[in-house]
Image: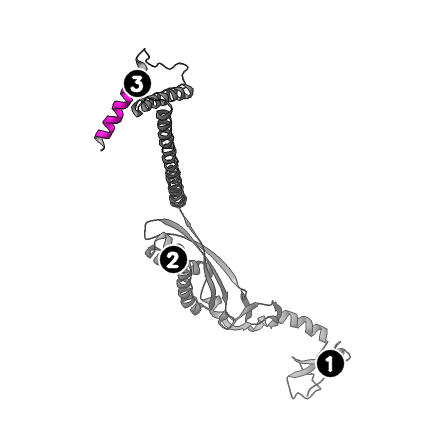
Amino acid sequence: MITRDSSVSNLLSPIGQSPISFFSPRRPQASQTVSSPYSVSWVPAQQMYTMGQLLCCCIQVDQSTVAIKERFGKFDEVLEPGCHCLPWFLGSQLAGHLSLRLQQLDVKCETKTKDNVFVNVVASVQYRALADKANDAFYKLSNTRSQIQAYVFDVIRASVPKLNLDDAFEQKNQIAKAVEDELEKAMSAYGFEIVQTLIVDIEPDEHVKRAMNEINAAARLRVAATEKAEAEKILQIKRAEGEAESKYLSGLGIARQRQAIVDGLRDSVLGFSVNVPGTTAKDVMDMVLVTQYFDTMKEIGASSKSSAVFIPHGPGAVRDVATQIREGLLQASTCHP
């Protein structure tokens, strides 16, 4: 016979005002006919809510994050963002959280180039965990950053020693591509996606950088010296062309001057011979030469920096000068007929 406990018959649930019942063992009375070892008892819903809090736990999973649920130490499921209940009395527990946000790891690797220059290569790896492989990302790797760093070291130290220093700077994209391909192939098995890999810097030794700067400066100075020499060459050519043109014009002027002098002398000789009877052309030429001699001495005295000019002079100096000039002209005409 099933009876209801009268001590709790008037207790109602605060939610919906409906009673909540559960079965409890009860000893039968002697006057009752026993048809079942259980009786129906009535318990308020507030007590049931408190019991529910003791029997299960509610957790919140944030956006861009997943939670790993285990049951008796074994992976059960991946909890998406939201509110979830974990009935701990059934062996369920929270193992941890896994972020799905994009993460960045900067790796600095020291290596040597083909021309024996030690450099520090800085690689930036952007990666994230895959939601559909969250269990692999959570359980298969204990230290994701160390694993990625090891692969970056391996690829960079295998790629850079094949290149000279200048080629390493020029082929940064190829090195980054090789690192990204190797990481993508290795980390996909662990539930991670390699979004992008960048070689952000290549730092040679300080002495090497100073030497490279000096080489660059020397090359630029050499180019500057070449350009300066070309400019000087052009200036000298133009200067020589100007001097040649100047001398040509000066020669024309001197030739015309001498022609004018000769014409003047000829006219003077003819006029002197006509006006002074008995004089010959030789006498007139001697007089003209002596006159030019004294004009030359005058110019020497005027243009000389010294205050005194010593000229041999005597009673027969004029005749001697005329004789010497005449003999010089005759010798010149003999040597150059």
Residue matched to label 3:
321
Q: Earlier in the sequence, mark 3 or mark 2?
A: 2
Residue 131 shows in this picture: yes
**Magenta segment range?**
318-334
Q: Amino acid at mark 1?
A: Pro
Residue matched to label 1:
19
Would you say the magenta stretch is mainly helix, strand or loop? Answer: helix
Residue drawn at (42%, 69%), measured in percent from left and top? 189
Badge 3 density bin: few <14, some 14–19, many ≥20, Cα 10 Å: some
Q: Earlier in the sequence, mark 3 or mark 1?
A: 1
Viewer-proximal residue, 101 or 22? 101
* Residue 301, position as x, y percentages in the image: 40, 18
Left or right: 135 in relation to 214: right
Residue drawn at (36%, 26%), measured in percent from left and top? 274
Cα–Cα span, label 3 and label 1: 161 Å
Residue 333 is covered by the magenta coloring: yes
Viewer-proximal residue, 28 or 232? 232
The residue most toward the right is 10
Cα–Cα span, label 2 and label 1: 71 Å
Residue matched to label 2:
156
At mark 2, the secondary structure is: helix
Residue 215 shows in this picture: no
Residue 111 versus residue 62 in the image, above or below: above
Q: Earlier in the sequence, mark 2 or mark 1?
A: 1
Residue 243 occupies quadrant: top left
Residue 109 versus residue 186 in the image, above or below: above
From the image, state whether disc 3 or disc 2 is nearer to you: 3
Left or right: 318 in relation to 19: left
At mark 3, the secondary structure is: helix
Badge 2 density bin: few <14, some 14–19, many ≥20, Cα 10 Å: many
Residue 106 versus residue 192 in the image, above or below: above
